Image: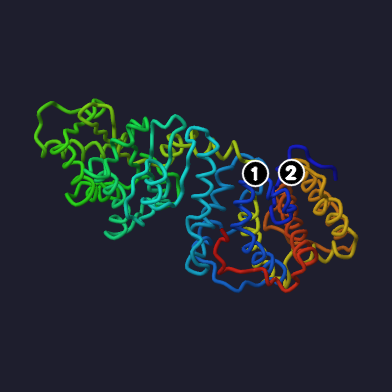
Amino acid sequence: MTTNRDAYEYVILYITPEDLIRSNDLLRLQWENLKTLVPCFLKCLYTGSIDVRIHDFDRIFTGIINLNRRNIQSNVLGKVASLWYYLTKVFHQSIGPREGNFAEELIANWIKSSGVFSEVYRNITLGRVLKDIVGVNVESKSKIDFVLRSRDGGIIAFIELRMSEHTGGRTAQESLLDKMVKVLELLEHPRQKLREKLVRGETTQLDLSIAILFSEQHELLTVKNYSKGRLSSLVSYIMEDRHVWGMIKKLLEEHGYRLCKETSCSKNVDISAMRNIIKNALLNENARKVCIESSDSKFKIWINILFGDEFFRRYAGLSLNELLVKYKQIIADDIWLFYTLTINELKIAQQFGQTNVRKVYEVLEESNFIERFSREVYKNTKISLRDYIAKLNEYVEKCASAVLEQFSKRGEELRLLETNDAVASYEYLKQVCIGALSTAIHIKEKSDPEFRLCNWMQSKIS
C-alpha cells in the first residue's frame, strides 16, 4: 500500500532521536514531562496488564478517539488537551508533584515567542523579581506564577494562573491574593517607593491579573460556561478590607489615587460607593477589570480577572487554538495515542490473552523490519526534524501494510476495533504499529526489556 499524502502525520517523541528533541525547546519541554511515563504505557501494551489504577482520565478518554484522520487533523486542541490534562491532573495522587509544570512552561514558551514581552519570569519569589526589575529590596518568599515586562518597559504584569475556576477554599484564595496585596502596599511605601521607581524606569502600567483557564468540566473558560458562584466568591475575597480592596482604599484615601476614566464613575462619590463601583466592575461578566491611577495620571494599575482566551490574547498575542495551530507540528502525540491504545489494548488482552501491539511486535521481530527502522530512521543522525517526521510516518504506513500481508498469509485475524469502518480500523492499525515500534526501540535501543524506566512516581526533572 502506498503512502497516503493526506494521512495524518504522527509526532512520536519516544522514538525521535534525542539530538532532534534537544534542538527544539518545545519538544524538549514535552520530552522532559513524558519520558518516564511512556515506558509505563509500553509496559502495559507489551504485557497486557497495568500496575496502577487509572481513574479520572477513564471517564474522558475511555475508548478510541480521533480515529478518522480528518478528525485528528482538525482537532489540534484535543490533541494537546490530553497531554496537558494528563500531565497536570491525571495520576496526580499517584505520581506526585507534576501538576502545573508542563502547562506553565508551555505558556512561558508561547509568551516569549510572541515578542510582546521581553522578560518572562515564571514561578519566582516576589522579593527576587522586585529586586531584579526595579531594585526594590523586600523580604518575601511568596512565589508569583508569572511576571512579565513588555519590550518597551511600559507594562509590568504580575499574573496568578489557575488551571481551573475551582480555586479552592479560604486558604487557597488568600494565597492567590496576598502577592497582589503586597505589591499594592509597596507602591507608596515611604522607603520602598515602588511606584516612583517603576515610573523612573518608564513603566506606566501595572497589571495585577488572575487568569483562570478552564472550567470544572475541563473546557476553555468563557463567559458562556463560567460559574457565577465561583466568580462571586473570588470577587468577595478581593473586596475584603484585609485583601486587595483594603490596599486600594488606602491608595484612594491617603495617596490621591482615583478611578481611571476607563472605569465609569461619577465624580465626588464616597468611598462606599467607590467600593461598589469596583466590585460591580469585577463582577461584570464581559469585562471583569478595573483601573485606578495615580493623582498625576502618569501611572495606572489594572486589576483583571481573565478567562481562557482573554489571558492568551492579552499576553501571548493569540488565542489558545491559534497558538496550538501555529505550533501543531511540534505538539507530540505520545500521551493521547499511548493512553488510548492502552485502554483499548487492555480490553483486547483480557478477552484474547494478548494485545495487538504484542502480536505486531512479534511479527515485526520475525522479519528485519525493526532493524531497518532503527538503522534508517531512529539512528539516522543526518536527518532534519521535518524529514524525520515524514520518514517515521512512511515507515508506519509500511508497517501497517506489512502486518496486513503477514496476517493474511497466515490466515489469522487481527481483532482491532468493534467497527466495520475500514478507515478507522486501518488508522488504528497504524497506531498499533507505532506502539510496536516504540516497544521495540525501548527494549532494544534503550536496553530495557524489563521496563525499569517506567516510573509513575517520578516528578519532572528540571
**Element type at marker 2?**
helix
Residue 124 percent across, percent down from the top left: 43, 51
Image quadrant in which you'd find residue 175:
bottom left
Instruction: Give the side of residue 381 with respect to residue 30, left or right.
Output: right
Which of the pair 140/47 is nearer the observer?
A: 140
Q: Which residue is mark 1?
A: 330
Which of the pair 332/432 is nearer the observer?
A: 332
Q: Residue at x 56, y 61 (%)?
A: 460
Q: CA distance from mark 2 to mark 1?
A: 9 Å
Residue 321 percent across, percent down from the top left: 53, 38
Q: Which residue is mark 2?
A: 385
Instruction: Give the side of residue 257 with respect to residue 433, left or right.
Output: left
Sequence-wise, the earlier of marks 2 and 1 is 1
Residue 258 percent across, percent down from the top left: 19, 31
275 relative to 395, above or below: above
Marks 2,1: beta carbons within 8 A: yes
Q: Residue at x 59, y 42 (%)?
A: 76
Which of the pair 54/67 is nearer the observer?
A: 54
**Element type at marker 1?**
helix
Look at label 1 and name its amino acid: Ile
Look at label 2 and name its amino acid: Leu
Residue 142 percent across, percent down from the top left: 35, 55
Q: Which mark is residue 400?
A: none
Q: Residue at x 79, y 50 (%)?
A: 396
